[in-house]
Image: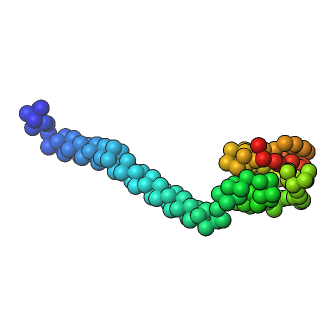
Amino acid sequence: MMERFRQLAPREQMILGAGAALAFLIIGWSFIWTPLVNTVDELRESVADQSRLMVDLKRAASLPSSASAVAGGGADELPLIVEQTARPIGIASSFTTARSEAGNASYRVSFQNTSYALLIDWLVMLDRDYGVGAREVRLQPGTHGPGFVNGAVMLSRN
């Protein structure tokens, strides 16, 4: 192969050498430099995500523990559980009334223009983490558009 290269005219040798150098640069750029830069960017994003997670965990650690609310297990702690769980999710501001009913065994929460998805997530979390189930749910479309509801939920211990 080198013998054939030496048989070429000097001008052809120069063009072939420049083409090989250009091909080497393109291959190096495509298969070495670009993946390295992309990996560094992904790692920076990952570090930023982890930092945000740490901030959220520190905030969560500073919130009052819900273990005290669950430990007693009484229905009289339903207002505390509702308050502690609804506020971080962001639906507590849409509550219009919240009151104990039926001899303090259940707790009724009325709300307006609440995100349906957040409400369902909240109810699932109450059931899963606190043993508080929705005994009666009444929903109507909200006035803020699709995805928002008005209504009331009757909560009690499972």
In the rendered view, tell whether residue 28 sits above or below residue 83: above
| Residue 148 seen | no
In the rendered view, tell whether residue 1 sits above or below residue 77: above
Residue in view at x 84 percent, y 59 percent: 94
Residue in view at x 52 percent, y 57 percent: 49
Left or right: where 54 falls relative to 95? left
Q: Residue 102, how many percent across, how many down? A: 91, 51
User: Could you tell me which quadrant the C terminus lies in?
Assistant: top right
Q: Residue 86, how many percent across, how many down? A: 75, 57
Left or right: where 34 falls relative to 3? right
- Depth check: give the residue in front, 96 or 62: 62
Q: Residue 13, how many percent across, how many down? A: 17, 42
Residue in view at x 50 percent, y 58 percent: 50
Q: Residue 71, how many percent across, how many down? A: 68, 55
Residue in view at x 61 percent, y 67 percent: 62
- Depth check: give the residue in front, 146 or 29: 146
